[in-house]
Amino acid sequence: MLASLFAMMSMATNAQTYLDPNAPLEERVKDALSRMTLHEKVNILHAQSKFTSAGVPRLGIRQLNMDDGPHGVREELEWNTWSPAKWTNDSIVAFPSLTCLASTWNRELSEAYGDAVSEEFAFRGKDIMLGPGANIARTPLNGRAFEYMGEDPYLAGEMLVPYIKAAQANGVACCLKHFVLNDQEIDRFTVNVNVSERALHEIYLSPFKRAVEKANIWTIMGSYNLWKNVHCCHNDELLNGILKKDWNWDGALVSDWGGTTNTWEAAMGGLDIEMGTYTDGKLRESEFGYEHYYLANPFEKLLKEGKVPMSVLDDKASRVLRTIFRTAMNPNKVIGSQCSEAHYEACRQIAEEGIVMLKNQKNILPIDATQYKKILVVGDNATRSLTKGGGSSELKSLRDISPLEALQTLYGDKIDYAQGYYAGRSIYDRVDAIDPAKQAELNAEALQKAQGSDLIIFVGGLNKNHRQDCENGDRESYDLSYGQNELISQLAKIQKNIIVVMFGGNPYSMPWLNQVSALTHCWYLGSESGTALANVLCGKVCPSGKLPITFAEKYEDYPYVKYGPEAYPGVNKQVHYKEDIFVGYRHFATNNVTPRFPFGFGLSYTTFSCSKPVAAKSGNEVTITVTVSNTGAVAGKEVVQVYAQSPKGELPRPIKELKGFAKTKLLQPGESQTLSITIPVEELRHFNDSQHDWTLISGDYTFHVGTSVNDIFGKATVNL
Ligand code: BGC
């Protein structure tokens, strides 16, 4: 006892490198670790409240404060429960959903997003933001697709990198989620994903790898589901093998909340911080003290018994200390701000560029208000707060401008409104429990008002209710709910000038498409939702968003559907990704299935011409050069997309794979810009299951250059 007291006193006189902000990070980590007792090391590896993990108060080492993510800072919850803490100063800016960010195809906006959102986290005293998300839109039914970046691993990865870099430059760690294969919400706690090694690497791991290698992501969240029948929060092969050894990652792996299920696996399977664990199938959290966490007393016992080597403990503790010094004890961490005008500005710009215009017959858009006396807005999403609901990404936003509000500001008395249908208010209101009489009454009111209008703007789509776009449940159908399809058709019969505006994180069927004049898809747009939408509809902003997800004509066209329930949502808690690498457009393009709207597609108010692409190889890179000219009458932006087609090899390959893209600046009418898109040759490799490694096939590579995967304006070939 006395001896250890002396040891502690003598240590205290040593230079405290770990507290020196100018000392190299690894020296701070080593020094701090050398001063900690075994119990203190264990103590930083698990939660001490719902959203914090402990530091070492005796040594002045700070705790880690975490919060959801990914679209803004979540409302403050009580220390020990999921109930709101009822703070009055925790209202924030709600940023657009990540699917909307992906739709901008604009890396600068991604950087602006990461910068602004992390400033809000910093101001609220947070060190780790639980986001962004990088799971793949494999099914249009996934309840959480809105939190991710679409179906293509390259687009997702490229858009993640600037976001993460900007946030971490502010001293706030991103926690990229959910690693990995958490591509459905049905059975998310129990489903085991069977996927080929090739699809795992080429599709599902790819955005995470890019975030590790190109953005040096500081923390990653393990997913609930299993891979090779082991939970991904403590899956040795996945976490110690692929992530930490093969990718050489030095960050901390955080469990998803309640995703840890076993002490031995938690100890040996690569988990560093255990969060949100509760007992008995996640029922009785109040009786379960933090000292009972798998990585608390039970882990300490294994260490003391010599069953787990101390090196395992030191590795985990070092990763957590590294995270603390990178964030909570980072002298360059910004103070940040909350609800600043600059944040609203970023929010609005991202929203405006993420809106995708899918149809615009006879140029009904932008709206020429002089032509209309009465504009009828119909639909629940015209007034509903879409920052509420959805699960852990729900936000308490200070400003939440609805489409109706913004359209009223723009067009004043010309605007009339009818709700048209009822979509439930509590997130657990079931679609089939909605009173048909109430629905009929709202339908009738809208149809009656339609008679007296000369333009209808229908604002509908999905919402954040359970089994719409919401955590812990997938959509029940590819069709829109609440009778929207029938209502749109009926409205279109009365008034042919009808503009449809849809919100949602997923595609849906559109049996009414031929009857309507225009369609824009808005994802979720955040605090400035209405303003951004109105700016696009009135023409103040020229749309430039492009789909990051294929919109199929019918559900059966998605690649896994033909394989039946084994391929989704699984049978006996086993799901088999039988479509393999042919996810999204990789399937539609290769197997000649015509989508309703292809990946990468989006219309503009202006027109562009693109020069014949020129490809040049230099060293280990191929550069494609294209000149884009605005040939229309208004200023606009265009996205040039490069899809590679590789020479025939032993393995099947998609006919087109996105390998590069660039967005022009705002081009004035008549203005041109030359874009150079560089593709490192290693990006053209594929993963070879038999060699367990990446290989490059030699031969002619064709680069299809276009404005969507199906709108190719030129090709260039390079021999590699
Ligand atoms: C979600 C995570 C979230 C966590 C904390 C989990 O249920 O899957 O994405 O960060 O809860 O709210």
Image (spheres, grey):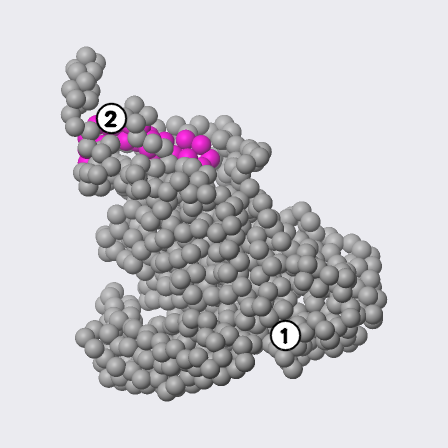
In the rendering, at what x and y percent does residue 409 appear?
Answer: 68, 59
The amino acid type, in three-letter code, at marker 1 is Leu
Q: In the structure shown, which secondary structural element does the residue marked by tag 1 occupy?
A: loop
Instruction: State left or right for residue 61 relative to residue 552.
Output: left
Task: Single out the mark in the foreground, 1 or 2.
Answer: 1
- Image quadrant containing the N terminus: top left
Tell me, yes or no, whether the two marked residues, 1 and 2, touch with CB atoms within 8 Å: no
Residue 395, placed above or below residue 314: below
Residue 105 is one of the magenta-drawn residues: no
Callout 2: 10 Å neighbours few (<14), some, many (20+)?
Answer: few
Residue beneath disc 1:
365
Residue 46 is one of the magenta-drawn residues: yes
At horizontal 32% and vertical 75% (from top left) the residue drawn is 676
The amino acid type, in three-letter code, at marker 2 is Thr
Residue beneath disc 2:
37
Residue 328 in view (yes/no): yes
Q: Is mark 2 within 8 Å of ligand 1?
A: no
Query: In terms of image quadrants, where is residue 508?
Result: bottom right
Instruction: State left or right for residue 472 relative to residue 28.
Output: right
Callout 1: 10 Å neighbours few (<14), some, many (20+)?
Answer: many
Q: Nearer the viewer, residue 111 or 622?
A: 111
At horizontal 34% and vertical 62% (from top left) the residue drawn is 206
Q: Nearer the viewer, residue 303 or 362?
A: 362
Residue 529, placed above or below residue 172: below
**Mark 1 or mark 2, earlier in chain:** 2
Which residues fall within the magenta stretch? 30-56
Q: Nearer the viewer, residue 557 or 447?
A: 447
At horizontal 65% and vertical 48% (from top left) the residue drawn is 428
